[in-house]
Image (spheres, coloured by chain):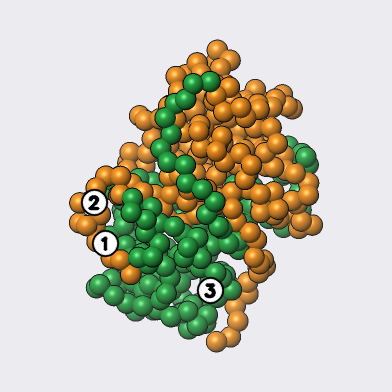
Chain colours: A orange, B green
Amino acid sequence: MKYFNINDINSLDKIFRINLINSCSGFKSANLLGSISTEGNTNLAVFSSVTHLGSNPPTLGFILRPTTVPRDTYKNIRDTGVFTINHIFEDIIEEAHQTSAKYPGDVSEFDITGLEAEFKEACIAPFVKNSPVQMEMKYVEEVYIKSNDVLMIVAQIEKLFVNEKLIHKDGFIDLSAGKVVSINGLDGYAVPKLKERFGYQRPKNK
Amino acid sequence: MKYFNINDINSLDKIFRINLINSCSGFKSANLLGSISTEGNTNLAVFSSVTHLGSNPPTLGFILRPTTVPRDTYKNIRDTGVFTINHIFEDIIEEAHQTSAKYPGDVSEFDITGLEAEFKEACIAPFVKNSPVQMEMKYVEEVYIKSNDVLMIVAQIEKLFVNEKLIHKDGFIDLSAGKVVSINGLDGYAVPKLKERFGYQRPKNK
């Protein structure tokens, strides 16, 4: 095993450190967040920090650093209270990753990448067409994490669209059947294949 | 597409809703958190919410609901200030998931599952032997997320052990080369395969 203590980590070359620490938490969710400005400019940005917070009410969170990119996403969410979460799937990984480049606020990542915006069910923010899981999210609150100067944005699921082929009888969404991907580090995209479901665990004897 | 609005979601059968909402955020990290009580009892619990918060200082967070299981993990972390994060890999998924059952505080999940505890570099909390990525974490702060009654535990990486075969020249850890898995929903384990790395993105013309 290669061993790094905190002093080693702090002394690493910056790029090496960023790659190492961004890949050491495990595989991450791969989502495109869609939003719209009050002037009507659409925005799309890749995020790898969307996390389940609870099922009742159905709540997700994600992390951003408001003083750096992607500022447009944050401003749009605060101005309109609404955004979408769309799962990245195998066929669009290159286009999805291209949204991580810094474009001016009046440039839509939909135009740049060729990903198609979809508007439905009176949601003002754009969905990503053909994404197998799409959600309209309502901003609920933001929580400041002082020790690292980041925000967790907390939002409630208002509308959920799922490719029906992925839904099992008990509500489980088989993400790998929809070719949903996972992010490794800052720029690695991996394709997971479901291996097994184990069900609810009860204690067993030693 | 199957469509659920918030009223549909709230009216769903409880098990269906929990499965649906736990799988709709995308693939999740798959980690075993190791801790030890002040009496010396080791504890091991599966978590799927470990999230990257920042590289400088190297900081991760995870979500827990302190009033429900796994209480032992939380109590041990608060009492000792230390815990470990160990990546779940393909060969141990069944044993890892078994740690989600509710055992009394004096029963060690290491004994129950057969996973082997490893102690090294003066870390008082147990690592999971053979896990390809292992970290000693220092508790930094906890942030209460009021709208959903959960805590985010914020912790700093003190020591990082990585199977050297997984580390690229630029610091990237190739998790799929270590058979690290990803969690889908509450009980699904998926094995990701790295498809592509795209590198840092600069704006391109339309």
**Is the C-beta separation of discs 3 and 2 under 8 Å?**
no
Quadrant where the image shows the C terminus of chain A: bottom right
| Residue at mark 3 | B92
- CA distance separating discs 3 and 2: 32 Å
**Residue B141 at x, y = what percent?**
33, 51
User: Secondary structure beneath disc 3?
Assistant: helix
Q: What residue lies at 31% left-to-right and 57% top-to-bottom?
A: B157
Label 2 SS: loop
**Callout 1 secondary element:** strand
Q: Which residue is mark 2?
A: A12
User: The disc labelled 1 sits on which kind of residue?
Assistant: Phe
In the image, what residue occupies the spot 43% across and 49% down?
Answer: A185
Q: Quadrant of the N terminus of chain A?
A: bottom left
Cα separation, mark 3 vs mark 1, equals 25 Å
Residue B41, x across and y down, in percent:
39, 79
Find disc 1 in the rendering and name its residue.
Answer: A4
Q: Is residue A85 left or right of residue B40?
A: right
Q: As drawn, is A160 to the left or to the right of A25? A: right
In the drawing, what numbered circle is on residue A140?
A: none
